[in-house]
Image (cartoon, grey):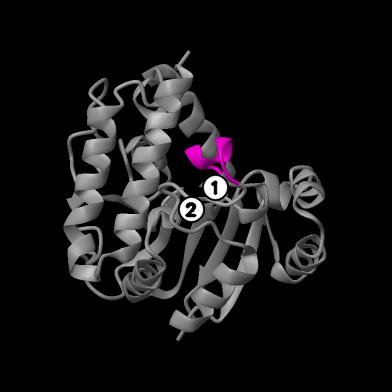
Amino acid sequence: MRSVENVIAQYEYERAAAQQLMQANREERRQLYIRVYEELFRRFPDHSELKVDPAVRWQRVKRQVEKVRHLCRSDMVFLEIGAGDCRFAYAIAPYVQQAYALEVTGAKLPGEMPPPSNFQLLLFDGFDFPLPDNSVDFAYTNQVIEHLHPEDAEYHLREVYRVLRSGGYYLCITPHRFVGPRDISRYFTREATALHLKEYTYHELSQLMRQVGFLKRAALVGKQVVSLTPVLTAERVLSALPYGLRKSLAMRIPAFRASLKIIGYKRAD
């Protein structure tokens, strides 16, 4: 178990790093994101992300794949942005024609098995996707967009929209603000103040998606793709409640407690 002093030290580092990222311009952030996370893992080798057993990681990945594989087709080009150790892209590869993983470094590839034949790791600067327009059918992120500066989140969505083919879609999974914060600041504050630079609501992310061209959006609840209308209605009701009651109720509602899952569709020609 981590010591209280170590948790406090990590929070203080992340809070300062978050402030630095929020104050930096876009060009500065291109290098700053990488440095911030390299320093985080260097300073805190007992970070929870570094301590998970590979077998446990694979179990988590298999559960994630089961929830989304019905969205895949065998003729589909799949893209995961911010793929981390690429285990999810490895596991989804059997269900698609081509699986791309976008990451800023290839150092975290799983070493216990070779990559699937239809898998390819693409390195990028965290901003510009090294893929042509209209080349992807299914784009996916899980616990990524909350780590981006709000200006970079919009840029990210524009890049996703650019690479999607007509009729393609993007599934974005991110912590819902009503059940947050979900970074280390949860021990200290009611709002995310560490390296989750912004935790979103359905309304906020839906509006941002609409701005970049995703005119049709839906929610993924369990394995079901559902209309956003009842989800947004529930969100408006919850937003009027005091913090404690709102969080308690949100934790009981599947559309909120297990992360916000929103799908944006690129209009078919």
* In this picture, residue 88 sits left or right of residue 214: left
For the point 22% across and 37% down, the residue is 39
Element type at mark 1:
helix
Residue visible at 37% across and 20% down in the picture:
51
Q: Residue flagged by tag 2: what amino acid is it?
A: Cys
- Which portion, as a residue range, is magenta? 182-189
Residue type at tag 1 = Val
Farthest residue, direction bottom: 269
Q: Position of residue 49 (x, y in %)?
A: 38, 29
Per the image, is 186 magenta?
yes
User: Looking at the image, which is closer to me, 30 or 75?
Assistant: 30
Residue tagged by mark 1? 68
> Which quadrant of the structure image shows residue 158?
bottom left
Find residue 2 and report its horizontal and vertical position in percent. 45, 17
**Any mark on residue 72, and which?**
2
Residue shown at 79%/69% (left/top)?
Answer: 233
Locate residue 152 relative to residue 223 in the image: left or right.
left
Kindly tell me whether residue 132 is visible in this rendering: yes
